Amino acid sequence: KQEVTQIPAALSVPEGENLVLNCSFTDSAIYNLQWFRQDPGKGLTSLLLIQSSQREQTSGRLNASLDKSSGRSTLYIAASQPGDSATYLCAVSGSARQLTFGSGTQLTVLP
Amino acid sequence: NAGVTQTPKFQVLKTGQSMTLQCAQDMNHEYMSWYRQDPGMGLRLIHYSVGAGITDQGEVPNGYNVSRSTTEDFPLRLLSAAPSQTSVYFCASSYPGTDRITFGSGTRLTVV
């Protein structure tokens, strides 16, 4: 059974800092890995998708890496802003695109 | 607007009642799925479908039924609601070619 762990569970940083969120998974036989953002009381927004054959993806200030052999992914956020405050969820995909999620990292960026 | 539409947004049920959570998408996505999210936890897969007429169980299927008679719709049925089913339910869909997954805005269900 696939298990996904995210560390830390919560993180508070001052505005402008660069930060790294961590995700690990137990079964390396994944189809892809995705990072999502969830604002309080809202649905999920897809941030980055990394196919199993890829090593990283970038979008603006966000960079996600994938090391499938070690079962790890990181989400790097550069020059954090208060608007980045949200919960960030990591999920790995099986062959039918069913997702297994971590429990998330709650990020607070202080002005 | 194109996307995943969930209804209702909020629902309160009494223990033992049944109901159907509706999910519809207009993007011609083959893959659809239902997740539940409990406080402090990530989303857990209830049921999923890879196409019309095909469904399968996820991690927490007990107490829920699904069917997929059309590509567009994937309703989730609670057979006999229990307080343990109090949660936020999300429906999602994706297309095999892109793998981008689109989530609905969720249904917040309370069972009393």
Image (tube, coloured by chain):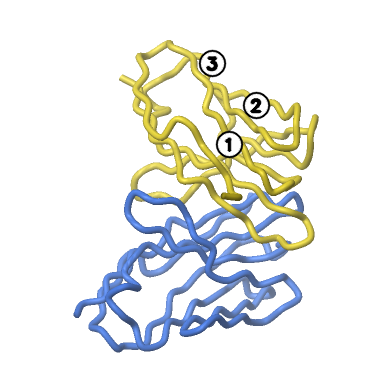
Chain at tag 2: B
Give B87 or A4, whichever is nearer the viewer: B87
Give A35 or B21, whichever is nearer the viewer: B21
Chain at tag 1: B
Q: In the displayed structure, does residue A3 sit left or right of residue A110?
A: right
User: Residue B79 — which label?
Assistant: 3
Q: CA distance from mark 1 to mark 2?
A: 9 Å
Which chain is drawn using yellow? B
- Residue A47's x, y, as percent? 53, 69
Q: In the displayed structure, does residue B3 sit left or right of residue B109?
A: right
Vertical side of A37 occupied by B104: above or below = above
Q: Which mark is first along the chain, 2 or 1?
A: 1
Which chain is drawn using blue? A
- Residue B34's x, y, as percent? 58, 39
Q: Which mark is first along the chain, 3 or 1?
A: 1
The residue located at (31%, 73%) in the rendering is A83
Q: Are marks 1 and 2 in contact (CB under 8 Å)?
A: yes
User: Residue B46 — which label?
Assistant: 1
Q: Which residue is mark 2?
A: B66
The residue lying furthest to the top in this view is B16
Look at label 1 and name its amino acid: Ile
Look at label 2 and name its amino acid: Val
Quadrant position of the C terminus of chain B in the picture: top left
The residue located at (77%, 56%) in the rendering is B96
Give A26 or B46, whichever is nearer the viewer: B46
Q: Residues within 10 Å of mark 1 (few under 14, many from 20)?
A: many
Q: CA distance from mark 3 to mark 2?
A: 11 Å
